Amino acid sequence: MSNLAQDSPRRRLISDSLVQLSSVRFKEFIREPEALFWTFAFPILLAIGLGIAFRNRPAEIVHIAVVGSSPEASRVAAAARADSGLAVEVLSPDSASAAIRTGRVALLVVPQPDGRVQYQFDETRPDARNARLLADNAIQRGYGRADQVRVSEAHVRERGSRYIDFVIPGLLGMNIMGSSIWGLGYTIVDARRKKLLKRLVATPMSRAEFLVSYLVSRIALLVGEVVVLLGFAALFFGVPVRGSVLQLILIVLASVFAFGGLGLLIASRARTIEGASGLMNVAMMPMWVLSGVFFSSENFPKAFQPLIQALPLTATNNALRASMLRGAGWTVVGPEVALLALWAVATLWLALKWFRWR
Amino acid sequence: MSGALAVSVRALRKRYDDVVAVDGLDLEIPTGECFGLLGPNGAGKTTTVEICEGLTAPDEGDVIVLGRRWATDERALRERLGIQLQETQLAEKLTVAETVRLFRSFYARGRSIDDVIRVVQLDEKRDGRVGKLSGGQKQRLALACAIVGDPELLFLDEPTTGLDPQSRRQIWDLVEEFKAMGRTLLLTTHYMDEAERLCDRVAIIDHGKVIALGAPRDLIASLGAEHVVEFVLAGSSDSLSDESLRRLEGVRAARRIDGNAWELRVSELHRTVPALLAELAQRRLQLAELRTHSATLEDVFVHLTGRQLRDE
């Protein structure tokens, strides 16, 4: 900037050291090819995989078996075949029990000597219950039951209600959590291990600026992460962003501060990478499972819900889904953002209090 | 402010668990002096320097740096100090210029980045990654980061340990340049030649205490002998005693190192060596080896502690 041997003191709105610290963080990150892969390519690969696995398929064919070789068995099988959604086999008792054990068929239909028909299935499996309903309906009709009400069908496939719509905000939340906690935790512990932290505090560097620079560089990188993932999801899967972009930005910012604070807290005392990564996994693992990344957190028992709903990743995912998929207003999104802000303040405060600079 | 003290340390004590690192140490370094802390590994040099640098808190004692105390004036002091730590690894993914620019940004005033990079002779590596630098180049970069704030007082903790002779000489030139600007320097080393060449005064430290203090030349002169003669006899040496050697002209002290090996401290080499050869001839003793060197701070340390300075 200046070639004078003596530079004069400078006063600016944003200090030069904060700019330098932040740009150094940013450069160190983008010069690390592996980190770039995990941050940008990995979530997209995951989204592609999940998008293929859970793509909307035509209504599935249900496999069932009729057991025995009696004339009654042939009649029941013929009745069931009237439903095009059922694939019906007639099997001997031995092969039938093998077929249901391995899950090749979801339901066994066993005609009884007394003229009744017995359904054998696992009542805890939704597809087996579905098979029972379809088979029963087809068999009753085949034996002459008449429908009481005339019905018709119209098929609806709504953007925003598919699995890919559910999982993209979850992946985004998970990505923000992972990159914030790893991005801060790893680099800070590494700097402590290499005595770089000690060297930096031997200068007049502002310690607050040092920590803030991590958040600044994370936010800069996050713009890329969010745009890449959501852009990809919108382009290839038509995942909607119904809420305002401003709302989305505020949710993401609150989330970065919450997870950044958590990352700083984890890194505040650890001296080794091993110690820190253990702590990071302890912090992140429960949230991967509980916070509704791949399936709804509502699946867990009611007793756990207050705890689950208080987790920062749950708040992030809830807010992202409400905003992106439903276009929900601030009455829904606001409390989740406030919860994230609370996490940010609490973790940053504790991290500053406990931070080990040497 | 000539005559003022840059560093003043009184009755300093520091213990780690059950190890006493610093045990009642006093130091006074006038402004403009290049002062060396010399001692073996584990003598307490680094702990002492890091207390002076405000990076470690002492258990007891008083530390005044540039007329201020760490407890009350940390930020102001940091602006005026340059520090190079023993084992810092700078960020490998940054370039030389980026690293220096980062450190420059912490100081309200200081030298220009180009100037500092030129002084440490890293112009050619300016845009090279830190991770690709050699050991000597990394050490010069660490020095660049230490002087970029244009410090009044520079701390160097073992600046040349592990470097090849040419790199060591380059670091020495930089230190000489800094000294020529009239600034104060406190450096630690376990190389005697380094201390003798760079330091105006040295404190020899052992077990956390100062056991000798003064200009290198004065400390060596205090041995009363400028030269050391070592010789090894071939065959039996039972007829030779310390006493008979001490009577030789110019010999101040004589001791048997082990077996057939002896060491003499000598004031006038040109008189002692002929006398020694005559003495041995008269006793019909054969020399296997004969070496002489000028007395060094190493000899001072051996004289004071009976141990070698470097535990190699």
Image (cartoon, coloured by chain):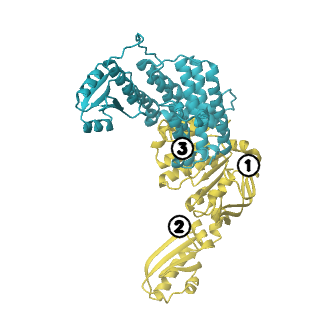
Residue type, label 1? Trp
Which one of the lettered chains is coloured cyan? A
Label 2 marks which chain's residue?
Answer: B
Marks 2, 3: nearer the viewer: 3
Q: Residues within 10 Å of mark 2 (few under 14, many from 20)?
A: few
Residue B70, label in figure: 1
Asked whether B40 or A44 is in front, the reply is A44
Asked whether A203 or A34 is in front, the reply is A34
Secondary structure of residue under mark 3 = helix
Secondary structure of residue under mark 1 = helix
Residue type, label 3? Val
Residue, far front: A114
Q: CA distance from mark 2 to mark 3?
A: 45 Å
Task: Tell me the residue that label 3 is attached to.
Answer: A282
Asked whether B41 or A71 is in front, the reply is A71
Secondary structure of residue under mark 2 = loop
Measured from the top left, where is residue A204 in percent x and y? 67, 41
Q: Residues within 10 Å of mark 3 (few under 14, many from 20)?
A: few
Which one of the lettered chains is coloured yellow? B
Quadrant in the picture for residue B40: bottom right
Label 1 marks which chain's residue?
Answer: B
